[in-house]
Amino acid sequence: MSGEGTLVVLITTPTGDEAAQLAKSLVEERLAACVNIVPGIQSFFHWEGQLQEEAENLLVVKTERSRYPALEARVKALHSYSVPEILALPVERGSPSYIEWVRRTVLPEGG
């Protein structure tokens, strides 16, 4: 089944409770159908002119394109980073039953 409209959003967080709190908020508010937390990633990046190395968590968020603006706004409101990583990737194909479940979960009835 075409995944048109379905997105996978990647968000990094510091280690600790922030990832779980953010994941729970996104699912409770129906901005995401599901959020997986991948602990223990190591990130390397330039920030304020310095090479940084940080232990982080990766959130893998499943949602619909129409919910993305609200999801992004909520992440920015809750996230501790001044510039959080929020990257939305389109889903090209997926299991029809899973894609339909994501849609039903995050979209209002009739949406």
Image (cartoon, rainbow, N blue to C red):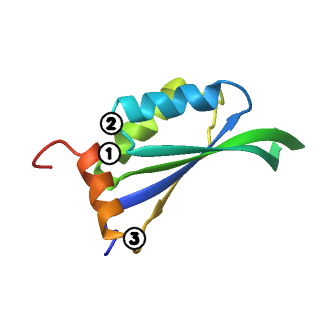
| Dot 3: element | loop
Above or below, 82 against 66 in this view is above
* Quarter where residue 100 is shown: bottom left
Residue farthest toward the left in the current orientation of the protein: 110
> Residue at label 1?
67
> Is residue 91 visible to the viewer in this orientation of the structure?
yes
**Residue 57 image position (x, y, % from top left):** 70, 40
Measured in 3D between alpha carbons, the distance from the residue under mark 3 to the one under mark 1, in whole angstroms, is: 19 Å
Amino acid of disc 2? Arg
Q: Earlier in the sequence, mark 1 or mark 2?
A: 2
* Quarter where residue 47 is shown: top right
Callouts 1 and 2 close, C-beta under 8 Å: yes
Residue that appears at 48% across and 29% down: 24
Disc marking residue 94: 3
Measured in 3D between alpha carbons, the distance from the residue under mark 2 to the one under mark 3, in whole angstroms, is: 20 Å
Amino acid of disc 1? Arg
| Dot 1: element | helix
